Image (tube, helix red, strand yellow):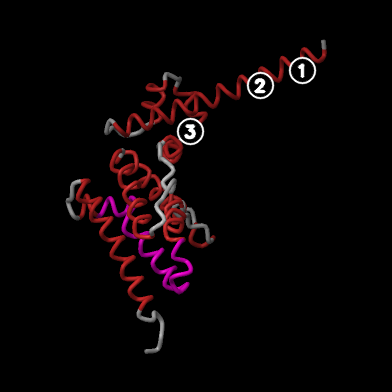
Amino acid sequence: MTEGRSGSATGAREGRSRQKLRTRRALIEAAVTLIREGRPVTIADAAEAAEVSLATAYRYFSSPKELLDETQLLVSAPDFTADLPSDPAERLDTLVSRVADVQFGDEAVWRALLQASLERWFRQEKDGGSAAGEIPTRNRTRLGLTRTALDPLADALPPELHHRLTMAVNLVYGMEALITTRDACGLEPDEAKDVMRWAAGALLEKALREASTGYGSDG
């Protein structure tokens, strides 16, 4: 009897936990749908789309900003570094192309994620993040991808040059580069992607050229 009641209680808790996860996911999926439809994300609209009550939605997310922060969990992204070629130039070109394809393929959602990140920075800065040393940073996924792509050059380039190349490549692809090529330059996705690939390749060529001519030498 005791074991039966205990098992039943455990099962009930697990059931409630799964339901909470389903509700949370439904709200996040609703937010992604709103973004893709070009509609502003509100808790009320997300609750309606997810078919949950407004009161329930607010138990999970107290503001649209919190909900937007969570949409990145639902953005489908492949393993960008899977099966990269061994040649450094081809590796880098493949990585930049893959990231561009995914981000241009779901541009509204990625723009919303960038917006949420910027708003989070301003909120924390307003709350004294600067004084407390807690200014938020973007996640470093892209930096990790770049490092993986350029890892074969770790022994071929001087450490300082390898580091500078990694930082420079990080500037020419990803969401900031998407915004620059699309909004500031007025490019269509295909041309914007080609510009990103060209820029990354040019940086790599320059680094290799500098290494071959004695980077950092006094002469």
Residue 43 within the magenta-colored segment of the rendering:
no
Tell me the residue at 46%/61% (across/down).
151
Q: In the rendered structure, which amino acid carries the disc numbered 2?
A: Arg
Instruction: State if disc 1 and disc 3 touch (CB < 8 Å).
Output: no
Residue under numbered circle 1 = 6
Labels 3 and 2: the sequence-earlier one: 2
Q: Magenta span covers which residues? A: 152-180
Q: In the rendered structure, which amino acid carries the disc numbered 3?
A: Phe
Type of secondary structure dominating the magenta stretch: helix
Residue at disc 1, secondary structure: helix
Residue extending farthest bottom: 219
Residue at disc 3, secondary structure: loop
Residue under numbered circle 3 = 61
Residue extending farthest front: 86
Tell me the residue at 64%/22% (across/down).
14
Instruction: State if disc 1 and disc 2 touch (CB < 8 Å).
Output: no
CA–CA distance in space, label 2 to label 1: 11 Å
Report the number of numbered marks: 3
Dot 3 alpha-carbon crowd within 10 angstroms: few under 14, some 14 to 19, many 20 or more: some
